[in-house]
Image: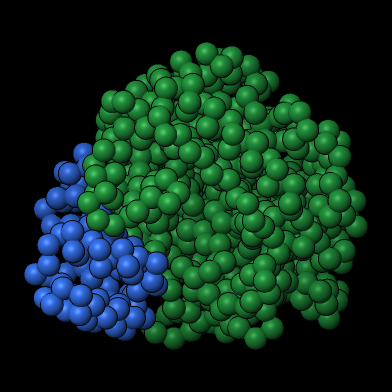
Chain colours: A green, B blue
Amino acid sequence: MSDTYDAVVIGGGAGGGIVACVLAEAGQRVLLLERGKKMSYADVTQDHLRNHRLGKYGHNTGPELAGNPRVYIDPAGKRYVSTPIGPGYNNNAMVLGGGTLVYGAQAWRFMPQDFQMASIYGTPAGSSLADWPIGYEDLAPYYERAEWEIGVAGDGGLAGKHWNRRKGFPLPPLPDTPTRLLLRRAADSLGWSSMPLPLLINSQPYNGRAPCVQCGNCVGVACPSDGKNGTQNTVIPRALATGLCDLLTETQAERVDTDAQGKVIGVTFVSIRDGKVERRSVRCKRVILSAGAIESTRLLLNSASAIHRRGLGNESDHVGRHLQGHVYVGAHGVMDESVYTGRGPGASIVTTQFNHGNAGIIGGGLIADEFIKTPVIFFNGCFPPGARRWGLSAKKFMRDNYTRNVHVQGPVQEIPSPDSRVEIDGTVKDRFGIPVVKLSGTIHPETLVVGHFMRERAEQWLTAAGAKGVWGWSPDGLGLSAGQHQAGTARMGNDPKESVTDAWGRVHGHDNLYVADGSLHVTNGGFNPVLTIMALAYRVADGIVKG
Amino acid sequence: MNFLDRLLSGDAHELAEPISKGLAELEAAAVHRFNQPFVDLTPEQQDALLEAVERKYFFQQLVQLTGEGFYADAGNGGNLGEISWKMIGYQPRLKGNMQ
């Protein structure tokens, strides 16, 4: 631990881990701050009621329920002060590796059209739908780097039909499942494209680590074989191996420090040592925010000063706006025979037929089969609407359906709204006395239209597969969406009046303050966003190294 | 301690009062309608009483907690011997924590 660094990276998740690695390997002295713990597989636990897929009573990877409140304003205007399992909290894993320690690990490139949403579809009234300042071809080399350095299993040939790719994936797809085979036949019969789901999971030994053991517990918990690839077992160890990167876990950044002229000069952070709250500051040449779309916003806004009264990078009032995530839609059906093997990950096949090119619809999304569900998740979400969840009929439903259920779903590309936002609450503070965020707003109504269209496609796929009792769901009301796919709050752009950072993730008006997480996403694709966060982090870091 | 006792004295303590109040009312209804305690009724009689309260808050919460206890991992105290998992065919491929 030193008093000065070349770079301070705030947040050791998907984005920050990569930036720390690239900068340290380029010879920079880096301090990586992570407010969560470094956790092993055993530390994370297998509790079916306290994990990141079902956090009914708590989260296995934080934040802890006490001392980490957020304020949430619901669509009716009611105000909540929420714990991490309370209304509207929109939690993401708070641990070294961030969401990448406990995710399902879907490895998506956004499509070229995803970077040009406004040009292709126009901007609906009341929305802030816009083009990115970069295109797919700008990001493609960095997607490739993420796929190879973190490790993705997939079918490069089939993916090549939808994406211009220079090479395939480093690992072959995970093995076939009964569901993949029956859904592939169904897609073929409908004339839809399909392919094995690309996953950041080792189908074979890779980078010195073991392959997936198909335990069937991917989402919400850590991996027993360490064959699921996150930043905690790839780039962060590499960063530390340089000897140039110091890692402080259980240490929360409080503010980005600026001098009297408003120039970024360092970071103040806080931790608990020997039972006492300890504040420290370091000086550095540059700061990179990778705390996620909600907490990176909090830092920008909490770093207000006499020069930057509305927070850093917020001269045009875009910081914290355009908050978006993914509305999920999908369908359930029942096959005549069991399609269950117990072998994970479970999610195995996808169609990207409907991400774009749908008449009268803005964008769309992928549809894939779902990861293996724990029985309690099945109990919570898989009874058809109106079905009784108690008594003999409920037990019979569980017994007859668990192994025969087919479940497809996917993220819908949201139409961003400027009124869906992160602000600082004026009164509520966390355990360190730091002002917390206030979340408010809703998805844009156009997103409901896309969701309904995609729901029908999910039902169509299951029906073609021969499933009985098919029923789908999509939202019919407006609510806030952010969650684990949170994005958009520090959008990139060429015009400082319309964005927070430039096309390289550098905050407008600053020459040494950067963002490298989902905050940068102008739009969030109809895809799980992590590979895009990773690719952008490589690109932001590359921009810093090359100056 | 079993799942419900553990939860109602801990993570879901705010439900202890409405649930015990609702169960007391259910018991009173059993005696009133069938002249016997709820546990001594036939399954058909029990279902008839439960149908009458199935839209009530206490009952919906109780159903939810019962499902959580019965279908979650045995470590939570409500799925002894993983009996519900055997019933539905769920086969966890990991036993306990591996390092």
- Residue A267 spot, x, y in % from top left: 65, 70
Total labels: the figure holds: 0
Q: Residue at image x 52%, y 13%? A: A189
Q: Is residue A427 left or right of residue A345?
A: right
Q: Is residue A542 above or below residue A88?
A: above
Q: Residue at x 90, y 57 (%)?
A: A497
Residue beneath the point at 52% across and 32% down = A459
Residue A351 position in % (x across, y down): 56, 26
A448 or A317: nearer the eye? A448
**The one of A154 and A33 positioned closer to us in this rendering:** A154
Left or right of A57: which side holds A475?
A: right
Q: Is residue B52 visible?
A: yes
Report if residue A147 is visible in the image: no
Snapshot quadrant of residue A313 = bottom right
Toward which corner of the image does residue A204 lie, by quadrant? top left
Q: Nearer the viewer, residue A419 or A31?
A: A419
Asked whether, in this view, residue A383 is left or right of residue A244, the answer is: left
Q: Is residue A112 shown above or below A263?
A: above
Q: Position of residue B32 (x, y in %)?
A: 20, 80
Q: Is residue B80 left or right of residue A214?
A: left
Q: Position of residue A70 (x, y in %)?
A: 57, 74
Quick one: A492 or A220, which is closer to the camera? Answer: A220
Q: Is residue A216 above or below residue B73?
A: above
- Residue lying at the far left in this picture: please name it: B40
- At x 76% / y 76%, what residue is drawn? A304
